[in-house]
Amino acid sequence: MEKYYNHHEVEPKWQQIWDDEKAFATSSDFSKPKYYALVEFPYPSGQGLHVGHPRPYTALDIVARKRRMQGYNVLYPMGWDAFGLPTENYAIKNKIHPKIVTKNNVGRFKNQLHSLGYSFDWDREINTTDPGYYHWTQWIFLKLFNAGLAYKSEMPINWCTSCKVGLANEEVVNGVCERCGSEVVRKVKSQWMLKITEYADKLIEGLDGVDYVERIATQQKNWIGKSQGAEVKFALTGKEDTITVYTTRCDTLFGATYMVMSPEHPYIDKYQSEITNWDEVVAYREEASKKSDFERSELAKDKTGVELKGITATNPVNGKQIPIWISDYVLMSYGTGAIMAVPAHDERDWDFAKKFNLPIIEVVAGSPVPVEEQVYTDVATGTLVNSEFLNGLSVAEAKAKMIEFLESKGIGQAKTNFKLRDWVFSRQRYWGEPIPIIHCDKCGYVPLKEEELPLQLPEVDSYMPTDNGESPLAAMESWVNIACPCCGGPAKRETDTMPQWAGSSWYFLRYTDPTNDKALASKEALNYWLPVDWYNGGMEHTTLHLLYSRFWHRFLYDQGVVPTKEPYAKRTSHGMILGENGEKMSKSRGNVVNPDDIVQEYGADTLRTYEMFIGAFDQAASWSEDGVKGCRRFLDRVWKLNEIIVDGDEYSTDLEAKMHQTIKKVSNDFESLKYNTAIAAMMALINDFYKKGSVNKAEYATLLKLLNPVAPHITEELWQGNGFEGRLYQAAWPEFSEEKCVESTITIAVQVNGKLRATIQAPKDGDKDAIIAQAKEAAAEKITGTIVKEIYVPGKIVNIVCK
RNA sequence: GCCGGUGUGUCGGAAUGGUAGACGAGGAAGACUCAAAAUCUUUUGUGGGCGACCACGUGCGGGUUCGAGUCCCGCCACCGGCACCA
């Protein structure tokens, strides 16, 4: 063998052999135990692979390779989430068809991933822009449509001024477009919507049965934002109409001293003639409509509002006349668009009441400070007062009693609300899945027939988005105009396309049976492979992709298409890789590291090892070129063990315990995201080999097996070079025995009054009294006075307590 | 404001309530070399002592325990998410 590890030769050599041998092809033998490991498929951007990509890919590659060695039939697939704006923008700028751009980018990404030695099953590669794939994305859409979960609605949407598309709420971050950072304004448009809200409860419940890291589950729950309360009807004084409000504090109903409606509330126009200060109201409404949602909520904590003079409401529990105000702190899009204001016990109402000098009535006693001076919102300790039949009750009791009362009188009822909104599902863009719907003036929205799928994306002359908010497809009259499938009359195709999230909402299903043209996947394949056993991805997708795909999956379960309620049994997420200066990598900061350069200079195995060794997997980590070198040094030292290999079929006695300990540690750590300590344990092991001056074949073989999932090329080369049989990737994962993890002679720490004073050597199953005696002798000088207590923790420590 | 998370050498980071700082990086000294790089050896928390050793050390203040980085109570700082959601 070569004296030094030459990654330029060894790595391509094994990549070629694995390809030729179809080493990582997934078996279709459904009688074997299966394991489905999944990483988020990338968007093939023009920049190529980022140094952040290999972190999760390597982590699950380790799991996949280990599972194969343990005898599982492993599915570890890869594909391309290739529809999307950057590709389309690039195509527009450079006048190349997005299809070509995608093809080029995919080619580059694939080469890069290949050069890192991942054990993906490339026979199952998928691409969301492939008509054979989006056939089924469209099919799912039709299912949703037929189930009444897809609908078209005129509504104010988030409109990105730069991308010229509507955005889902989840895509608006701090009032700007998540993707391009441009300003987002409200624009009323007719949009396709998906009723994800109908699944809000199911999406919360589903979290109970799966193993997600805590903060992912919490973030999803917060995003869905379930709250339990009541709807209460307030009569408009002297009118038939009632104003319904939503409240989570119906116990405080006696303290409601005014009402507030959203400036968009329909009753304002309805009662225009009764409102005596109409000019003022109109002016306020105009002011509010100019503000984006962001400005209304983030920047305007200072309360503003106008009273609707001329009309009042009646508090249903005590008959009091209370004024009605409008204010933009009440949102039309949540609850009923109107609230009852209880200034004594709600912070926002308190601020508003103070500003406009409205009465504050205490109905929950227990505040150390008068409610005129400070709002009192504690629900755990207060007692109801000034509330007739609720007096003396706790908040929780009062809520229950009030709901009972409201329901018996028919003036209100218990009600659950969610923050989650329906999903804006149409984009006015070219490079996306066409929505398979035809609009006929007579028949309304008519779905395409299943056998007409896929509805292919037509060739257009220009992909430019239009300023009037129409998709580029709208200009293609020959495509747009079509006979209605229902009545045969003139009709038009839908010209909006689906958002990027469509294709990624079900891709993990397609991997199980990627070329099926009769169904999105066969029943057999779905039954065998689902759920995904371990899914790793970015934290940034928690309220986007992860929630959307759970929604689609649960819907498909309800439709009898998939066999499990939840798509992913386990979800973890990785931290970001930051630049050397601790900042996010970006061109403008000049701290970008290109993975190709690292592979070229140090090799793929070094990059893989380094990214796993860099720190806790779920936390952000800064890049360090020195750290990369350290990992290369480790691999070189593994290589150079060649020089001190001796024969031996069994572990040598002095290293036996260490071998078993290391197998145990590495095996466990690979399962629990602790890749850094697994690698540290292997480093410590080879340090021991060098200290001893030799390593026997049995020990060496075990080391290679343990390291193989992390650094597959070098270990495979060493396996072959040292004449071990077969391929390392087919070898069996090493076993350990709990018993043999313990050394025959152990070191025991001796403490006196909790302070370390000595260490002693003792046999592993040494007698307690003998060990204590030995300990006393070793620490004799430190023991003063009388001994009060002697503590012995087997195998670890002796503590002598004296006074 | 609410919900999560984090706080340990010069740096990245290890430690089922049981020898704090594994492993790596960096620094220092030495070997090899004409020299450098690479490699190898030794050393490296702080303070004190020639020394075997001693004292102090895991954001701050208390507590529980024979024993606390780890558990409990009260703070502080930073990071992430949500946020006028009634």
Image: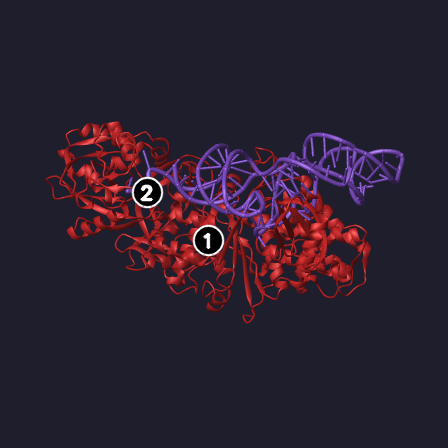
Chain A image colour:
red
Along the polypeptide, which appears first: circle 2 or circle 1?
2
Label 2: which residue? A189
Q: Position of residue A550 (x, y in %)?
A: 43, 55
Mark 2 lies on a secondary structure that is strand
Q: Position of residue A662 (x, y in %)?
A: 67, 56
* Figure check: A256 above or below A516: above
Q: Is residue A197 left or right of residue A629?
A: left
Label 1: which residue? A503
**Which residue ends up furthest to the bottom in the rendered image?**
A31
* Figure check: A327 above or below A627: above
Q: In the image shown, does A631 or A699 lie closer to the viewer? A: A699
Chain of the residue on which disc 2 is drawn: A
The amino acid sitting under disc 1 is Gly
Q: In the image shown, does B71 or A536 lie closer to the viewer? A: B71
Mark in the foreground, 2 or 1 = 1
Q: Is residue A749 left or right of residue A572?
A: right
The quarter of the picture where residue A62 lies is bottom right
C-alpha gap between disc 2 and disc 1: 24 Å
Q: In the image shown, does A191 or A267 lie closer to the viewer? A: A267
Q: Is residue A364 left or right of residue A738?
A: left
Chain depicted in purple: B
The quarter of the picture where residue A78 lies is bottom right
User: Is residue A42 in view from this perspective?
Assistant: yes
Q: In the image shown, does A529 or A782 lie closer to the viewer? A: A782
Question: Going 78% across and 51% down the picture, which residue do you hit?
Answer: A690
- How many neighbours does mark 1 have within 10 angstroms: few (below 14), some (14-19), or many (20 or more)? many
